[in-house]
Image (tube, rainbow, N blue to C red):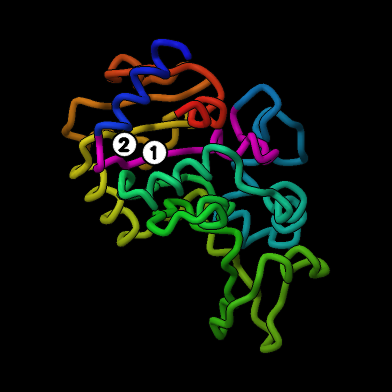
């Protein structure tokens, strides 16, 4: 076991007030592609850039094109939780972990057994008619032809935060509170480049800030411990 992983194990072993903040890198080991790596969505070629397609204004103006991309590239309903998801659920069950804060929209933390999960960007598993509010599953969205519609005629929209849309105030308040009160903050699988989510790190007041990532982030200099590598494999050693 590498020294950095040993230090992380010591921190986890000696704490019962851990908060985890994660991004796309947590789910790449479940074969869900991230956005910013060399083979991520932002480095593939489409008629429009993914940032444009996944914006509120594009959704309103080009709903059919939005859903063509969304069904093809955002829904991975066969994905299973990986070692990172399972370890976090295990820590929560044992009383060590107080909350998971995620930028992911895949629902894999809950599938692994985590109960206290704050989804900053929503979830593909929740979909609502914009007219009557009726709930629809992600499977319904995936199997629909063109733009998914409700029986009432309304368009169904995923409960996912698009570009140009604000984050949910209650989710943000809960995430900020969890981070501000944490003894240990472990951040993993995120470039820490997307705001306002990346700004949550500023609310941490402790001295056990751990960054677990394959690549560097703008916040590396602020970390008390840097662990480089695959988050699932690292967590599996703890």
> Which residue is drawn at the image coordinates 31% and 49% (left, top)?
95
Which residue appears at 75% of the width and 61% of the height? 64
Q: Residue at x 50, y 56 (%)?
A: 113
Identify the image quadrant of residue 157.
Answer: bottom right
83 w.r.t. 38: above or below: below
Measuring from the top left, give residue 38's x and y in whole percent.
67, 22
Is residue 108 rendered to the left or right of residue 140? Answer: left
* Segment tinted magenta in the rendering: 15-36
The number of callouts visible is: 2
The picture quadrant where one finds residue 220 is top left
Q: Residue furthest top?
A: 3
Q: Which mark is residue 145?
A: none
Q: Which residue is mark 2?
A: 199
Residue position marked by numbered label 1 in the rendering: 195
Crowding near the residue tagged with mark 2, few <14, some 14–19, many ≥20 C-alpha atoms within 10 Å: few
22 falls in the magenta region? yes
Kindly state the secondary structure of the residue where label 2 is placed. Answer: helix
């Amino acid at each position: 076991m590498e020294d950095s992983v040993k230090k992380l194990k010591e921190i986890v072993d000696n704490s019962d007030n851990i908060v985890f903040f994660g991004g796309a890198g947590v789910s790449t080991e479940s074969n869900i592609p991230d956005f910013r790596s060399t083979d991520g969505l932002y480095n593939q070629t489409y008629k429009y850039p993914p940032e444009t397609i996944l914006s509120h204004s594009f959704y309103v103006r080009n709903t059919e094109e939005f859903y063509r991309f969304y069904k093809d590239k955002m829904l991975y309903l066969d994905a299973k939780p990986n070692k990172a998801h399972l370890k976090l659920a295990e820590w929560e069950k044992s009383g060590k972990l107080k909350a998971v804060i995620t930028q992911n929209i895949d629902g894999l933390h809950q599938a692994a057994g985590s109960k206290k999960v704050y989804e900053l960007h929503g979830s593909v598993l929740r979909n609502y008619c914009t007219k009557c509010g009726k709930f629809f599953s992600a499977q319904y969205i995936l199997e629909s032809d063109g733009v998914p519609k409700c029986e009432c005629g309304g368009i169904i929209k995923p409960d996912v935060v698009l570009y140009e849309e604000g984050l949910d105030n209650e989710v943000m308040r809960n995430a900020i509170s969890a981070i501000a009160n944490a003894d240990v903050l472990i951040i993993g699988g995120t470039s820490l480049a997307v705001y306002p989510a990346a700004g949550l790190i500023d609310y941490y007041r402790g001295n056990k800030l751990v960054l677990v990532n394959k690549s560097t982030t703008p916040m590396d200099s602020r970390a008390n411990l840097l662990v480089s590598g695959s988050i699932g494999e690292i967590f599996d050693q703890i």
